[in-house]
Amino acid sequence: MSIEERLAAPLSASPEMCSLNMGTMNFALYPMAARFKEWKYVWEKDYLIASDDNIFRYTFRDIEKIYRLLGESHGTKFEHQCYDVGHIYNLAHCVDRGLFKPPMFLQLIFGILGGIGPDVDNLMFSVGAAAG
């Protein structure tokens, strides 16, 4: 989906807070398909299997556009989703550019294939990177 398509709902709702991924990543859920034998909905299995071709596109230009259209124009605050350490540094870069100002809400997400692994060392490193 384009940025405009992704922003259609939040621009019409003008939410107080909205999620914002802080970088592009492969977002893969396809290994989960092997864990299930029964599905609640007919689309679930195909959706999971097809995720081996998913990219969450969030370039610096995309992030700035989202900030300008939703943050500046609507006063929306963001919950900055960081799926990898690089996303924390992307956020720091955007802060340096004046796009976001503290206090900020960070969502450190671990264990999604394509992002940082779910272990204590990664958690500690990510928290240290976020603390600056």
Image (cartoon, rainbow, N blue to C red):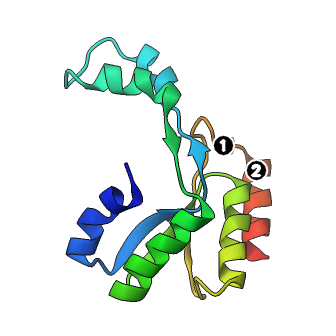
Q: Is residue 105 above or below residue 72?
A: above
Crowd rating for badge 1 (residues with CA inside 10 Å; few <14, some 14–19, many 20+): few
**Which residue corresponds to the image point at 48% horizontal and 24% vertical from the top-left?**
30
Q: Quadrant of residue 124?
A: bottom right
Q: Quadrant of residue 87?
A: bottom right
Nearest the eye: 4 or 123: 4
Give the residue number, with chain letter if any, for mark 2.
Answer: 122
Q: Is residue 62 above or below residue 48?
A: below
Amino acid carrying mark 1 in the image? Pro
Q: Quick check: marks 1 and 2 in contact, CB under 8 Å?
A: yes
**Which residue corresponds to the image point at 52% horizontal and 64% vertical from the top-left?**
62
Position of residue 63 in the picture relative to residue 49 (left or right):
right
Which x, y percent locates residue 103? 58, 87
Q: Secondary structure at mark 2?
A: helix
Q: Is residue 29 above or below residue 99?
A: above
Work out which quarter of the rendered image holds the C terminus and state it.
bottom right
Report whether residue 75 is seen: no
Nearest the eye: 16 or 35: 16
Looking at the image, how many numbered discs can be counted on the residues? 2
Give the residue number, with chain letter if any, for mark 1.
Answer: 118
Which x, y percent locates residue 46? 33, 20
**Which residue corresponds to the image point at 36% horizontal and 17% vertical from the top-left?**
36
Report whether residue 94 is seen: yes
Q: CA distance from mark 1 to mark 2?
A: 7 Å
Which x, y percent locates residue 45? 33, 20
Amino acid carrying mark 2 in the image? Asn
Q: Secondary structure at mark 1?
A: loop
**Which residue corresponds to the image point at 72% horizontal and 70% vertical from the top-left?**
130
Position of residue 121 in the picture relative to residue 53 (left or right):
right
